[in-house]
Amino acid sequence: MATEGVEVQVFADRDALVRAGAEALAEAITAALSERGVCRIALSGGSTPKPVFARMAATGRPNAEAWRRTHVFWVDERCVPPDHADSNYRMACEALFDHVLPASIHRMVGEADPARAAADYEALLRAHFGVAPGEVPVFDLVLLGMGDDGHIASLFPGNEALDERERLVVAPYVDKFSAHRITLTYPVLEAARERLVLVSGAGKHPALQRVLGEETASSADPLPAQRLRPTRGRTRWFLDRAAAEGA
Ligand code: 6PG
């Protein structure tokens, strides 16, 4: 499987990044539907996707017909109930899925026992995508962000989840939050047809320099975002100028 490489686009400010991110998501959904008649996307949480989702709801791009053929999953979730302020599912519903109707929505069950929730989500993915043990589901697009510490999904520096190459979904304990998270693992992120990474704000600049700089290949202690080794498709980094330049 050939990868299509990495593309970096820098936008003047956060608003321009949000508009571009919403358009890229709509285009990816439309392209998947025209090529395969169905679309499966996995969404991250955090603050950057929220205005992107809101813009998609406001613009009606993609349209209702496209959403009716699009299946929605999550990249990661906090271990909280779906109505909790920290829930990635709640954020996405308030911004988007209370306004559009996808073919199906599959939330990670944050209120359940973390290990159970991860195992159940993996089983759900295997059933939906029809993949056997040893195979990896292929999303049309996974939407990612990156933390100031270079984490992606809920794959945090120094966490054992970074080394998981067999399971599709795990529930690592994250020291910085004193809590578990539920997250897709690298094999799933790497197998997607497209990875769209949205990075906003000067706080992300130091990590970005490492991830997108020359040292990526040789880093002795790579950041989680540096450890992403796509096996298929393209990876697009959408940055605002503050993240790209640090000011
Ligand atoms: C989460 C996200 C997480 C996010 C980064 C960046 O559950 O918080 O999935 O991985 O993408 O923390 O978050 P911002 O978009 O808020 O900078």
Image: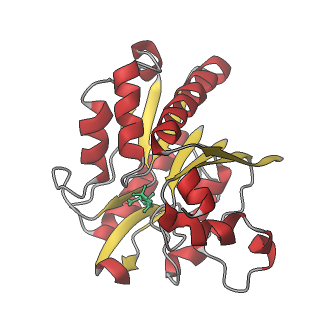
**Quarter placement of the C terminus:** bottom right
Colour treatment of the image: secondary structure
Q: How many marks?
A: 0
Q: Residue at x 37, y 40 (%)?
A: 51
Give the quarter the ligand 1 occupies: bottom left
Is 150 in front, or is 188? 150
> How far across and how far down the image is residue 36, in percent?
64, 23
Q: Residue 230 at what x, y percent from top left? A: 71, 56
Q: Quadrant of residue 182?
A: bottom left
Q: Seen from this angle, which residue lies furthest front?
A: 247
Identify which residue is drawn at 75% across, 54% down. Answer: 231
Relative to 169, is 10 above or below? Answer: above
Q: Is residue 154 left or right of residue 110?
A: right
For the question of whether residue 164 can be seen, the reply is no
- Up the image or down, 247 lies above or below 137; here it is below
Q: Nearer the viewer, residue 240 or 132?
A: 240
State the image quarter where residue 190 is shown: bottom right
- Locate residue 146, reporting x and y percent: 51, 61
User: In the figure, is residue 74 to the left or right of 207?
Assistant: left
- For the view shown, which residue lies furthest in the right direction? 2
Residue depicted at x 55% and y 27%:
29
Which residue occupies the foreground of this view, 40 or 60?
Answer: 60
Residue furthest out toward the left = 83
Residue at x 61% of width, y 75% of height: 223
Left or right: 93 as drawn, with respect to 227: left
The answer, for residue 192, to whether it is visible in the render is: yes
Residue 205, percent across and down? 57, 66
**Quarter of the image holding residue 210?**
bottom right
